[in-house]
Image (cartoon, rainbow, N blue to C red):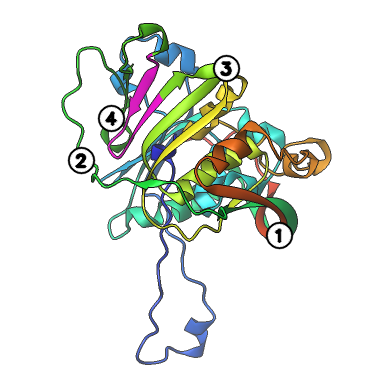
Amino acid sequence: MSAILSRISRLALVGAVLAPPIGLLAQKPVAPTFEVAAINPAAPITAQLTSGNLANLRVGLNVTDARVDIGFMSLADLLPRAFRVQPYQVSGPAWLSEQRFDIHATIPQGATREQVPEMLQALLAERFGMVTHTESRPLPVYELVVGKDGSKLLEATEEPGPLPEPKADEVVVGAGENQIRVSRGGGPNPASAGVRVTTGRSSMDVKLGDNGMIQLDVSRMTMPELVQVLTTFAGRPVIDKTGLTSSYKVRLELPLAELASLVRLSGLGGLAGAGGIGALPGGASPANTASDPGGSSMFQAVERLGLKLESKRSPVDVVVVDKMEKNPTAN
């Protein structure tokens, strides 16, 4: 779901008033590292779901104060977060998505949560022997633009607030800023009422619509979040060219057969599942092998929003995994 998607920030370096000695100019800044980090294989998700204590379920990356908790994530899930890129910008072997880990780490004094991606890079290099390089590759992409008749999106005017106490019929998964609540959706017909998923900043109603279509109603979504959803279904990168900067109410209607793709939005997918480059034998990209689905249900769903997907070919920076061990060194 878009609400648990990752947030990207940049730090600007300010030059010193007095020039340092020549020897210091040649030194590279030291990358931040976690003070302490424990890496363990994750328990099967089925065991966690049947434990009866869903409040302690940890899935995804959660940062609170000086603590970083990572639950049930594969190396394929961690790499995009470590390098501040999208899953399709990572090239590596398919096995990166197989083993899942729980990681508990402490941010050192003086460091900030904005530096967590760089700390993840250092952790992967130290404990998994990761070696990477970055290169530009020409890839087929879709550009998301406003349609000729203008956007039909409605702005989400209500500001998100803290979640109230859970209701008796709500299932609470996780805690803190990663908390998700699941309840039966509203509606007079229980068979078609669907499910409501709520987080601290938005809600999503999922129900079965006409002709076997799944209807998704999201209370607030930005264009960067929408293109991540569309990338999941498109099989190639989707780039935002709309110029729309607000949060919007979004309704998407997609075939029931594609519902499994929504699982990837939670960060549980791998390179192969999320359209990552290099997930196919010989390093072939799913984006390069997919045919243009023009006129498909996804394209129609986008057009109903007053938007349009245009097929292009564009250079994309890709993080290439040259070396990675399957298991970390001991804690």
Q: Residues within 10 Å of mark 4 (few under 14, many from 20)?
A: some
Q: Earlier in the sequence, mark 2 or mark 3?
A: 2
Q: Earlier in the sequence, mark 3 or mark 4?
A: 4
Q: Nearer the viewer, residue 130 or 208?
A: 208
Q: Position of residue 151 (x, y in %)?
A: 47, 51
For the residues labelled 4 and 2, the Cα–Cα distance comes to: 16 Å
Which residue sits at x=37%, y=54%? 246
Q: Residues within 10 Å of mark 3 (few under 14, many from 20)?
A: few
Q: Amino acid at mark 4?
A: Ala
Q: Label 3: which residue?
A: 211
Q: Label 2: which residue?
A: 161
Q: Earlier in the sequence, mark 2 or mark 1?
A: 2
Whether residue 13 is in magenta: the answer is: no
158 left or right of 259 in image: left
Callout in the foreground (1, 3): 3
Callout 1 secondary element:
strand
Q: Nearer the viewer, residue 319 or 185?
A: 185
Q: Amino acid at mark 3?
A: Asn
Give residue 314's mark: 1
Q: Earlier in the sequence, mark 1 or mark 4?
A: 4
The answer to the question of whether label 3 and label 4 lie on touching residues, with beta carbons closer than 8 A, is no
Compared to residue 272, the image places residue 126 above or below, namely below
For the residues labelled 2 and 1, the Cα–Cα distance comes to: 39 Å
Q: Amino acid at mark 1?
A: Ser
Single out the residue that lies furthest toward the bottom.
18
Q: Label 4: which residue?
A: 175
Q: Nearer the viewer, residue 281 or 5?
A: 5
